[in-house]
């Protein structure tokens, strides 16, 4: 996947046409779209092509539970073209974006939805808006006895990225992609084989979440993006034990794309430091540049980043 050329103008026209629409109107799926059902999927592919000889895999795994619904809507009605504009400004040549959505396998029959890696505005938007947000769909199977409450199925998103994506940037060049996970709840302690069997259709053993993250880290640079300072403070304890300084305090849900773009630009060496990144953001006329730079500073200054 990932063929075709990206047009910021076309993308901006798509999202601008939805101004004022409700999330229910933008995300009309009430049940999982058949094309986003992960069951039986061997791999979602991010491949090189003549148009994109050095593709870069970028996964947005979005918590679409009720408390996190603002981010998918912002992506689809305003912010996603800005992410791509920032990528272009920082000379990230061939980003290919995959959207995944998740809720809680204990209570929702659509705990994981997965699109395809795409490079064009129209197809990125298609997969994003095929996501079914929390509040409808099938009830979960009989996992209720194990329900922990106040958690989401982040483990399924990491597991799918680690074992059900095939990305040329890593397979051909040993160059990692990027995995951005949004959320405001603690994770489950691990992935359970019976859940993976039901949702994805493969046989796996139970595994601690730390092991699942370690598998994903072989191919991706993973980051957990908390939507605002209040919710960051609520979840930083358990998440920082797993990801350290890769847990980012996003200024607001509206800044999710800009924070992700900054992390890619820094990770790819497209900018050498935050001063250069700030200039790129200002050139792109991003309105909350100072806030995003402050949010990225702890990661830039972290021991892991500066090794």
Image (cartoon, rainbow, N blue to C red):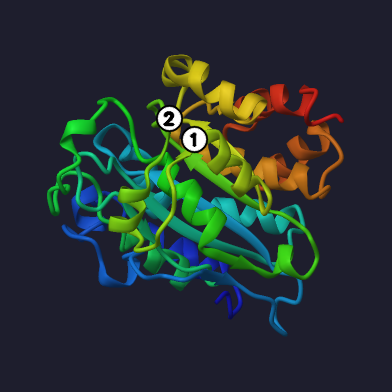
Measured as percent of width and height from the top left, residue 218 is found at 68, 50
Measured as percent of width and height from the top left, residue 276 is found at 82, 38
Name the residue that disc number 2 marks. Answer: 189
Residue shown at the point (31%, 49%) measured from the top left: 195
- Tell me if 52 is positioned left or right of 166 in this view: right
- Frontmost residue, 56 versus 109: 109
Residue shown at the point (20%, 45%) measured from the top left: 108
Q: Secondary structure at mark 2?
A: loop
Measured as percent of width and height from the top left, residue 241 is found at 58, 21
- The reply to whether dot 2 and dot 1 touch (C-beta < 8 Å) is yes
Name the residue that disc number 1 marks. Answer: 208
**Residue lying farthest front?**
205
- Frontmost residue, 280 versus 162: 162
Q: Earlier in the sequence, mark 2 or mark 1?
A: 2
**Residue lying farthest bottom?**
50
The crowding category of the residue bearing disc 2, from other C-alpha atoms within 10 Å (few below 14, some 14 to 19, many at least 20), is few
In space, the residues marked 2 and 1 are separated at their CA atoms by 6 Å
The crowding category of the residue bearing disc 1, from other C-alpha atoms within 10 Å (few below 14, some 14 to 19, many at least 20), is some
């Amino acid at each position: 996947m990932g063929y075709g050329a990206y047009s910021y103008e076309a993308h901006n026209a798509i999202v601008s046409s939805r101004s004022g629409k409700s999330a229910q109107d933008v995300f009309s799926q009430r049940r999982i779209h058949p094309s986003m059902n992960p069951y039986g999927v061997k791999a979602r592919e991010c491949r090189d092509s003549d148009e994109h000889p050095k593709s870069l895999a970028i996964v947005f795994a979005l918590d679409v539970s009720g408390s996190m619904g603002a981010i998918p809507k912002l992506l689809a009605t305003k912010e996603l073209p800005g992410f791509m504009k920032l990528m272009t400004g920082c000379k990230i040549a061939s980003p290919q974006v995959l959207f995944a959505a998740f809720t809680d396998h204990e209570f929702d029959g659509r705990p994981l939805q997965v699109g395809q890696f795409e490079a064009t505005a129209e197809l990125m938007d298609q997969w994003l808006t095929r996501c079914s947000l929390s509040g409808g769909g099938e009830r979960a199977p009989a996992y209720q006895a194990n329900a922990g409450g106040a958690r989401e199925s982040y483990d399924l998103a990491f597991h799918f990225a680690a074992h059900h994506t095939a990305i040329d940037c890593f397979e051909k060049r040993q160059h990692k992609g990027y995995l951005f996970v949004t959320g405001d709840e603690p994770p489950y302690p691990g992935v359970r084989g019976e859940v993976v069997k039901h949702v994805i259709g493969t046989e796996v053993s139970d595994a601690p979440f730390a092991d699942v993250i370690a598998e994903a880290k072989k191919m991706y640079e993973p980051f957990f993006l908390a939507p605002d300072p209040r919710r960051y403070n609520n979840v930083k304890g358990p998440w920082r034990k797993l990801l350290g300084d890769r847990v980012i305090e996003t200024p607001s849900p509206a800044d999710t794309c800009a924070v992700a773009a900054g992390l890619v630009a820094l990770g790819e060496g497209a900018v050498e430091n935050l001063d250069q990144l700030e200039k790129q953001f200002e050139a792109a006329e991003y309105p909350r540049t100072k806030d995003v730079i402050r949010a990225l500073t702890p990661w830039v200054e972290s021991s892991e980043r500066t090794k």
